[in-house]
Amino acid sequence: MSTMVKAERVCKSYGSVEVLKGIDLEVNSGEVFCIVGPSGSGKSTFLRCINHLEKINAGRLYVDGTLVGYREKGGKLYELRDREVAAQRRDIGMVFQRFNLFPHMTAVENVMEAPVQVKRVPKAEARKRAGELLDRVGLADKRDNYPAQLSGGQQQRVAIARALAMDPKLMLFDEPTSALDPELVGEVLDVMKALAQDGMTMIVVTHEMGFAREVGDSLVFMDGGVVVESGNPRDVLTDPQHERTKLFLSKVL
Ligand SMILES: Nc1ncnc2c1ncn2[C@@H]1O[C@H](COP(=O)(O)OP(=O)(O)O)[C@@H](O)[C@H]1O
Ligand SMILES: [Mg+2]
């Protein structure tokens, strides 16, 4: 099995505040890798490092065998140019808690925007593909609606389709259902589950332990910028080995 993401002693500080204190982990291709942990533990920061929205201060981070943000030559690291970083980021889809759709564009226009602007895909072709992706997330009938005319769950599904439009090899989800009304959570998780079944490699920061247990292949519990515990989600969730994990789970389960 090939490795999609490899983190080696990844450290990240903001000024004097150390947020990631040496993260080691490995995400296999095709797996659903869940990250759970209390607020402030560094989960979002870690995701942002993976697509180089943040620079790491120490350690190494690889996506699909390639160093993120740097080139290594003769034991030295050289920063990539903006254009090269952008090219790396293009292969990684990201879905946030807030959907961040363009409000003045319809669903289909939101989904076709990046392929047209970034990849120079002809508009007709991008529109056709966007329609197919909206169909895949169950929104074929909403393609001409504006975000304001969609529920939160529908907007989040458009956001997922938009990320998929760039044909990512890796999808990062940062608490994709946290901002949703409870009755809308299921429809988004169902789309993510279908994506997982299609073989997408996914890193999912979530508080949805049911999803982690059912769909997750691996799970790490983070606290205070370190990985406290990791393993099969069912094992970690039912039989946590560390006090901090037990305490956290007692609050969220
Ligand atoms: N841009 C930033 N500047 C300074 N501190 C930050 C910044 N982003 C995050 N932090 C701090 O880093 C810590 C981890 O944040 P975050 O990665 O968002 O945690 P989580 O996603 O697990 O809630 C928090 O203490 C937060 O205040
Ligand atoms: Mg966060």
Image: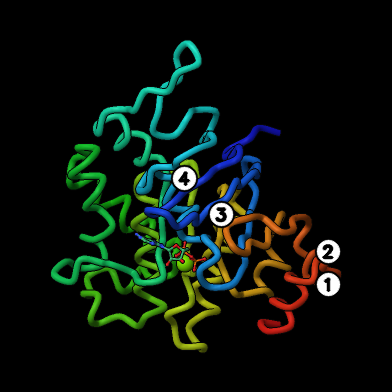
Q: How many marks?
A: 4
Q: Residue 195 sits in which quadrant?
A: bottom right
The tag earlier along the polypeptide, 2 or 4, is 4
Instruction: Tell me if label 2 and label 4 are in contact, CB under 8 Å.
Output: no
Residue 13 or 165: which is nearer the viewer? 13
Instruction: Tell me if label 1 and label 3 are in contact, CB under 8 Å.
Output: no
Marker disc for residue 238: 1
Instruction: Tell me if label 3 and label 2 are in contact, CB under 8 Å.
Output: no
User: Given the image, on which type of amino acid does mark 3 rest?
Assistant: Ile
Q: Nearer the viewer, mark 4 or mark 3?
A: 4
Q: Residues within 10 Å of mark 4 (few under 14, many from 20)?
A: many
- List x then y, in percent, for residue 83: 24, 31
Name the residue beneath numbered marker 4.
50
Name the residue beneath numbered marker 2.
235
Local SS, label 4: helix
Cα distance in 3D space between marks 1 and 2: 5 Å
User: Given the image, on which type of amino acid does mark 2 rest?
Assistant: Asp
Query: Quick check: 95 above or below 3?
Result: below
Residue at horizontal 48%, vertical 83%? 184
How is the structure coloured here?
rainbow
Residue at horizontal 32%, vertical 27%? 80
- List x then y, in percent, for residue 244: 73, 71
Cα distance in 3D space between marks 4 and 3: 10 Å
Residue 232 or 42: which is nearer the viewer? 42
Residue 161 or 61: which is nearer the viewer? 61
Cα distance in 3D space between marks 4 and 1: 29 Å
Q: Residue 116 sits in which quadrant?
A: top left
Residue at horizontal 37%, vertical 56%? 132
Local SS, label 1: helix
